[in-house]
Each structure stands twice: as C-alpha cells, then as structure tokens.
Image (cartoon, coloured by chain):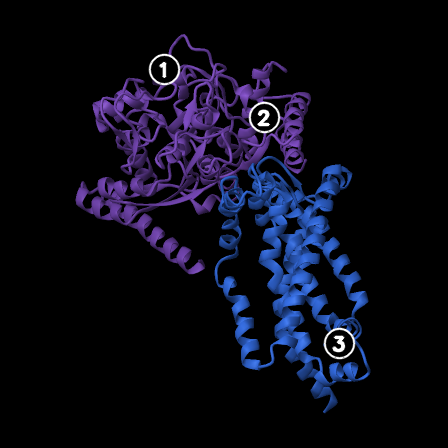
Chain colours: A blue, B purple
Amino acid sequence: MLRNNSVIGWLLAAPLSLVLVVFLVLPIVMIVVVSFWGATEWSIYPAFQFDNYEFLLTSDVTYRVFLNTFKYALITWVFTLLIGFTVAYYLAFHIRSLTWQIALFLLCTIPFLTSNIIRMISWIPFLGRNGIANSTLISMGVIDEPLEWLLFSDFSVILAFVHLYTLFMVVPIFNTMMRIDKSLIEAAADAGASGWQTLRHVIIPLTKPGIMIGTIFVVALVMGDFITVRFMSGSQSANVGRMIQNDIGLLQYPSASATAVILLFTVLLLIGTLLRFVDIRKEL
Amino acid sequence: MTTISKVRYSRRSLLKTGGAAVAAAALPAPMVWGQETKNITLRQFGTGVSNLNDVAMKVKEDLGFTLEMTALDSDSVTQRAATQPDSFDIADIEYWICKKVWPTGNLQAMDTSKIANYDKIVGIFRNGKLTPESTIAQGTAPHTVGFVEGPGGREFVDNESGWMTLIPTIYNADTLGIRPDLIGRPINNWSELLNPEFKGKASILDISSIGIMDMAMVVESMGEYTYPDKGNMTKEEIDLTIGIFTEAKKNGQFRAFWKSFDESVNLMASGEVVIQSMWSPAITAVKSRGIPCVYQPLEEGYRSWGGGIGLSTSLSGMELDAAYEYINWYLSGWVGGYLMRQGYYSAVPETSKNFMSENEWGYWFEGKEASDVITSPTGDALAQAGDVRDGGSFEERMGAVACWNAVMDENQYMVRKWNEFVAA
C-alpha cells in the first residue's frame, strides 16, 4: 500500500516536472552552455572558454549598467510599494462591501486590458517638449520654458515602470490583507492601539508575504526589461536587458548568454536574500 | 508554424517533381508552365525601405507568382540571413550586410548573363565609378562585395566576374535632416550635429555600423581628425571618434537616439529634435504631415548606402527560375519608378524613366524645378511647382558620396565601444 502510494506520488508529480524540465531547465542549461562558446562576426562555434565572462567582468561598462539596473529596480520598488500598499489598504479596510471591493479592484485592472507597449508609448506625446504636460504647465504660468527632463530621462523610465508594474504590487498585497482576521484589528483597537500602531504592529507584519511576492514580481520584471528603457530613455540609458538585446542584434549569442547567466544569478541571489526575511511558504 | 511549413514543404517537393516531369517530357507547353508558376511562392525579407506590399501585388499581377514580404530592421535582417537560411528564398539586404553574411554560405551567386538589363546597371555597382572620372568613396563600396569568382565562390573579387552576390535594386545618398523653421539659419556642415546651439535637440541613429559613419563625417568636419579610411578604422580611431560623441552625450547634446524609421519621423515631427541623422523617406514622411523638413546637402558630402537582392542557396529548379524572372522584372522599371518617386534611386534609372512622368523624372532625377505638384506613390503632396529637390540631380548627389556604410575589420571592437557609448 505504501509502495503503491509512492508510485502514485511520482506519477502525479511527473507532468509538472516534465514541463519544467523541458521548458525551464533545458533552456537555461542551453544558455549556460552557449555562454562558454565563441562567436565570429556571423556564426557561433562550440568551445569552452571564459572570454565572454572575462570581458564582461573586467569591463567597467558592465558594472555601470548593472548599477543602473539596480537603481531602476530599487526606485521602482519603493514607489510601487508605497502606491500599491496604499491602494490595497484602502480597498481592504476602507471599502466595507465585498461587491464594491471587487468592483473597484476590477477597475484597477482595466488599463491592463491594453498592451503594455501602448500604455508606455502613450507617455511620449504626453511628456514631450511640446506635449500636453509642458503646454499645460506653461499656460498655467508655472514654468516659462518646457521641462526637458520630463521625457527621455531616468524620470520618464521610472514613471513608466511605476505605471506598468504597480498592479503587480496591489494584487498580492490586497490578497493577503483580505485574509487578515478582522478580529485581530478589533483586538488591537480594544487594547488601545492607535491607527498608526495597528498598521505598524499588526497589518504590516501580517501583509509581509504579499509585499514579498509583489517585490519579487516587480524586481524580476524591472531587472529583465529592455523595451521600456529603450523607448522611455530615447535609447540613451542602458540596463542589462538592453545589453543582452544589443548582443543578440549583433549575433553575439555567447556574449548575450553570459550576460543572461550573470543576470539570472544576480536576480536569484536577490530573491534568495529577500526570502530570508519572510518565509512565504509558512505564512501563506 | 510547424504545420504550415510542412504543408509548404510537401507542396514544394510536389512542384519540383512536377517541374521535372514537364522538363523531362520536353513539352513546349507554356500553358502548363503558366499554371505551375501560379503556385510558386517566394519568400522575401528585408528592411522596410523596399519591402512594399505594392511590389508584391504587382508581382502577382505581372508575373503570376506570390511574393511574401517580411520587413525587419537592419540588425534582424543580418541575423536572419546569417542564422536562418531556410526561412527565406530572397534576401533584400544592404551591401555591408552582404559582407557580413556572404561567408556563411547562405546565399548563392547569380549569373549575370541571365540578367537582361545587366549592362544598364549604373557603374557604382559594377566598377565603382559613377562616371569614368569619379573617385571611389571610402567604406564598403558596393562593387567591392558585388562579385565572386564563380557559382560557389566565397571570396569577393575586384572585377566584373559575371557572378554577382547581390543584384542592386535601390540606393541613396544620406545626410542630416533638419527642421529649417526651428533652426532659422543655413546649415552647411556635418559638424553642426554637435554644435552646442542644438544642445538637447540633436539625435543620431543607434545602429552601430551606420552610426559610426555619421560620427566619422562629423569628426572630420569638426577638423578633429582626418581618417585614412572612414570605412575601416583602427582601434585608436574608433576610440577617438566615440570618445568625442560620448563627451557630447554627457553634456546633454542628444535628445534621444533612434533605431527605427518611425522613431526618427516622430522625433522630428514633434520638434523634440531639430537636427539628426535621417533617411530620405523619413523626411518625406515628416513633410507629408505638412511640417517643413530638409534633407540638407552638406559640404563634406554624403554617406551612401545600397541594397540588393540575394538568393538563398537552397533555391533551385523552378523557384530559381522564378527568382531570376523576378529580378529581371525588378530591373525593368516599374519598381524603380515607384522607389524613385519616394526619393531613392533605381539601379537601372533609364528603365524607370518609362514609369515616371516627365515632371517626376525632372524633379527626382535631373534636379530640375518641378513643373507641377510632386506626389508620393501613396498620393501625398511632397513638393509644389517650382520646388527643387534637396541636393539637386542624381549626378550631383551620388557624385558627392564621401563614404559608404561599412563593416570594419575591427567591427567587434567597434560594437563594444558603441555599447559603452549608449551606456555612458
């Protein structure tokens, strides 16, 4: 009987494992293998050499680009967290009826029914030198000259990121908040805690898993992005994704793979560190 | 995807056997041939400039077979030609891409004796000279990568060997585009691109092999350095060139970089940028929105490029014949006329003349005053009576080419430096 059970267990796990092996593990293994290959102008050839890594790790451009990528991830994380938490908090604790909660939550997702490229690109005419933002500010008399830094700058890149990814913070935080037992909050109030103290000592600790899942989403998305940075910075800033894209465009697959491996490693390290703070499995 | 290609494959092999059967029976049966041709599909890919649906429709009408077009950017075109030889029959690529891709063996040389208008192809593509007196510009000049020694040749040769790598189709002389209304003074030199007057209002294209040539034109014009050969820089020269532009970038000279045609149009039309490297049809697109835009001829000359059609190695039998038929049709004038009315040049201008009005020919090719409104092939007014083309006639423009788009020996080093420039 026991033996039978273990066979069934294996069988049940097999389909998922198979899918993961074929579509996740094998491609990553392939990328790692290719990252040691060599490349000429027009072809790649199998080899085992460290040239790609050596070039990457000794070039200060790599460090600058990675630093820039972290900068984008960190700033985007701070803003999406603040906005996402506030929105989720409002939905979970200030809206009383479930119907309204669901309705307002769906309202949040409506912009996401359009392509994210469209949502991103629509900022360009809005923020441009002669765009709506600048002409409004000028006609209101707030500024005399158009603000150049509104578009094709780090500002516009981060604005687009925050706009695109805040929902990924709202959803998991809202989800965990909805699971908080309301009697805990009542108990806090009964024990004489102020609203701020309840937030600080009850709600935030209990929302941690949601925050962490949202963080993983946002960080992974920002670290891997290339198209937002390209369009919103007018190709003037670089992040790791663009570096990989440039290499692919120039047929330098091994070098692109090496960069991808380092990026993967960095993101895993980052997420591993994050998970040290919260045991998602235990808290879910 | 798999299903489609499988279906195609079986249909193709069927066709080949069919064609062979016809040939074996040695039937002089044009009707059968005609029926067979109708079922042929040729897959062509290339940059957006000449991959036009109008051309595919006209091919169907005139020749009977189907031409499937895919338009991609320069990098993707190179990538596809080099890595996916079975995904295309006809590659519509630039000459510098040809230099990169030819060694892969994915393209086959073409027999010039099968090209009806070969003798009428302009000299630039045959011996490099527009007129017998002209000097050959720096860079990857088309004739240097235009011929190989035989059908299976892998090395380029420097004479008209009778085996061509690409059949030239389209070319032009590029320069800077400007917004005369926002600049308000004459622009005569490439160096103006880095003039602090246009701080935050300049742009350059982010395609390294073309961008570096524009940079070189600017550096020479500034008097910083004179290159022995802009098209084949040494590492020191690359450092110097990109160094100058990195400094300008750090000082905020550039508003943005562009990679695709429509990005350059939007930058210019919205007034974000007033001076930038640009392509001819992009100027046309800005103008057709009613915004003044000039393709400014500059004292130092033009940076030129040329494109052509290459055939996939896997093409054979009836499809190969159809491809030759297509090439002969391409050079016979209709496409040339179509492209020339967009501001490009055709490889065989004299055949294109028959497909253009006298006014159009005078305006686009001879540099004469337009006697009536000039419209684009899609019907937008591009110039009014009395206007003259920026830069003048064909000889004036193509005769003032300073360099061709190029691939350098130090290309990989250049690309790395270019990435640093973008990240700076």
Real-space CA distance between mark 3 and mark 1, rounded to the nearest whole angstrom: 77 Å
Question: What chain letter is assigned to the residue under label 2?
Answer: B
On the same chain: label 2 and label 3? no
Secondary structure of the residue carrying numbered label 3: helix
Q: Give the CA separation, mark 2 to mark 3.
A: 59 Å
Amino acid type, mark 3? Glu
Image position of B33 (left or right of A95): left
- Would you name the residue on which mark 1 appears? B395
**Disc 2: CA contacts within 10 A as few (<14), some (14-19) or many (>=20):** many
Lower position in the chain sequence, tag 1 or tag 2: 1
Residue designated by label 3: A283
Q: Position of residue B188 (x, y in %)?
A: 48, 16
Mark 3 on the same chain as mark 1 = no
Q: Residues within 10 Å of mark 1 (few under 14, many from 20)?
A: some
Image disc number at residue B408: 2
The amino acid type of the residue labelled 2 equals Met
**Quadrant housing residue B193:** top right
